[in-house]
Amino acid sequence: MTEPLGGWKRTHTCGELRGTDADRPVTLMGWAFRRRDHGGLIFVDLRDRDGVTQCVVNPAEAGAAHTRAEGVRSEFVLAVRGVVARRPAGTENARLPTGEIEVQVRELRILNEARPLPFPIEDEGDVDELVRLKYRYLDLRRPPLFQNFRLRDAVTRSVRGYLHGQGFIEVETPILTRQTPEGARDFLVPSRLSPGNFYALPQSPQLFKQLLMVAGFERYFQIARCFRDEDFRRDRQPEFTQIDVETAFLDRDDLLPLIEGMIVAVFRDVQGVELATPFPRLTYAEALARFGSDKPDLRFGLELVDLTELFRGGEFQALAQVAGTGGAVKGFRLPGAGGLSRKAADDLTAEAKSLGAKGLVWVKVTAEGLQSPVARFLEPVREVLLRRLGAGPGDLLLLVGDTMPLAAAVLGRLRVELAQRHGLVPADRRALAWIVDFPLFEYNAAEKRWDSMHHPFTAPRDEDVALMESDPGRALAKAYDLVLNGQEIGGGSIRIHQQPIQQKVFELLGIGKAEARAKFGFLLDALEFGAPPMGGIALGLDRLVAVLAGVDSIRDVIAFPKTQKGTDPMTDAPSPVPPVLLRDLGIRVVDVEKGKP
RNA sequence: GGGCUCGUGGUGCAGCCUGGUUAGCACACUGGACUGUCAAUCCAGAGGUCGCGGGUUCGAAUCCCGUCGAGCCCGCCA
């Protein structure tokens, strides 16, 4: 038996009433969170997006309301009218912001009923992802999850405020666009009016933002949806959102502080945290050497130390050989982990091998000496080894000798994992850093050519332009990543705005003039009509919000996310479509069973 | 493309290794009692193709094979 609003107007939210509101007549609306029926008194905890307020229905004072309240079940939609009262002494609830008071109900309306729920709203216990996604609108009713979206809103508002204040204008770019080569796999959309041709959904607004600079917009930003048809992870969804920024007439060292200002504004506005600037900068080479990663987690130490020289020509054959053939020996110290079991140590070795290393040397440092399967090879260098790593009794040392960057990368992974496992990651620390001076190219051995490390429009450093001719592998780029707590949350570059340099890059990438013209002709044309120096960055909004919210999956900050296979259990997307639609598009579906017999 | 974990009433789990009562527990749900609870309490009850298919066996939730789905990871993500 449900009723219409009947002219009732909400006077307060369920989160705002306090002791000072006593005796005030109020009208609240929301969902029945919990109901406690004492036969006489019925307590209903009414929840809206702002909080929970206890409503008490007394049969002696409001008979009709009490009769209705007996039929109320979880998640019924209610409107109550009553009077705010201080709770009787001793019955206050300190866990609720509204716990000083309750609403003594005079009238109650059931605005809508609800079936028993597939999972409880009230506790935050784990529910199967599939069920959560199928009933996502119920999952989103859970207060902690909803708070993530309030936070996300605060972040985008802060970003917009800051960038507008810096003279940026927000511009939308096409969702239906042209497929361009390289990068991730594209999502394609068939064209009815051009049968056999396809739009691609943008992996990022990369080309358009450069064209806006040629257009003279000077400072552009967009909170842009991006699409990539790759395999998904907890921090990767098929569609995600970037804060996309581009400016003209700025070089790297002017752009980075501008972006730092934005991050500082976000942390200040959203969390009241004042970040120190400038953010530390590490070169790509340094990040790799010291942390074994181009997105180092700087919340903790465990820095890698280079031990190549220590083992060169020594008795430890395996490592001596690595040192003698251009490889590197790297190591780090895990303080106080010398008590690791033999099995745990062997598991680490297996893990190092699964990451691609030929092996792992583990060493327990004790007061008596070194404990390790290869201790006798290490004894001759023990003192220097301990000194270089700053190690003492009780520590665990891990060493890998291999080609670079593999040796560092393997230890870099172990570094992060062991730090987490041993509780060495301070939960409240926010470690931001810029990684700069990325190589312009990386060599693609399979195809015998160079690939862009960032993208083909990334400018080389001014001093490295000549290197593109003589030694492309050593040319460094005006590219940069922003790293937060070991996660890449953004990346960008200064773009090439001079046609000849762009041509040279295409040449090295093995993209011929005709091919470049066919694929990026519109951009090359634009570069000939007065392109200003320009650069920008794209920040992963979902990842940034996830870190701020303290959740470890971006699913918890996206309202309607998809599963790891890219499906949506709620809408059942993707789905088959009526044949007539395919006919209009000139599309025939083959190999529906993926070609399997 | 590959590896690992999981799948048991609406939800969360136990049972599986070592095959053999009526598949157990908590929450939710239904009915009843109860005027100061806040995870209300107490009593009673209903609710299960053990993801699906095949095999082994006298007998399968349990062992084997396949398959589907979810998660985490590697590859991939300029």
Image (cartoon, coloured by chain):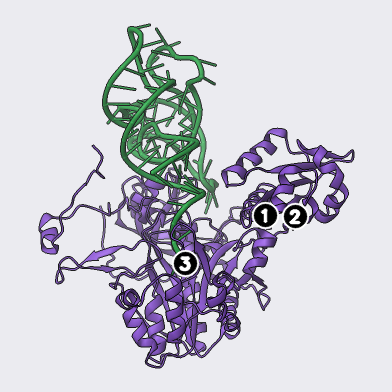
Chain colours: A purple, B green
User: Which residue is painted at 53% across and 67% down in the image?
Assistant: A489
Dot 1: within a 10 Å radius of its alpha carbon, few (fewer than 14), some, or many (20 or more) residues?
some
Question: Counting other residues with Cα less than 10 Å from the Cα at mark 2, is it few (<14), some (14-19), or many (20 or more)?
Answer: many
Where A341 sits versus A305, above or below? above
Q: Position of residue A538 (x, y in %)?
A: 48, 73
Q: Residue at x 50, y 57 (%)?
A: A144
Q: Nearer the viewer, residue A249 or A331?
A: A331
What's under tag 1, amino acid-wise?
Gly
Q: Which residue is mark 3?
A: A451
Report which residue position mark 1 lands on: A327
Type of the residue with mark 2: Thr
Q: Secondary structure at mark 1?
A: loop
What residue is shown at x 28% (from left), y 54% (from top)?
A573
As drawn, A344 above or below A258: above
N-terminal of the two: label 3 or label 1? 1
Measured in 3D between alpha carbons, the distance from the residue under mark 3 to the one under mark 1, in whole angstroms, is 23 Å
Q: Which is more toward the observer, A386 or A543? A: A386
Provide residue A400's location: percent of width, then percent of height. 69, 48
Badge 3 and badge 2 in a common chain: yes
Q: Chain under label 1?
A: A
Same chain check for tags 3 and 1: yes
Q: Secondary structure at mark 3?
A: strand
Distance from Cα at disc 2 to Cα at disc 1: 8 Å
Residue where numbered disc 2 is placed: A308
Q: What is the secondary structure assignment of the residue under circle 2?
A: helix
Q: CA distance from mark 3 to mark 2?
A: 29 Å
The residue closer to the viewer here, B60 or B3, is: B3
Q: Which numbered disc flags the more N-terminal residue, 3 or 2? A: 2
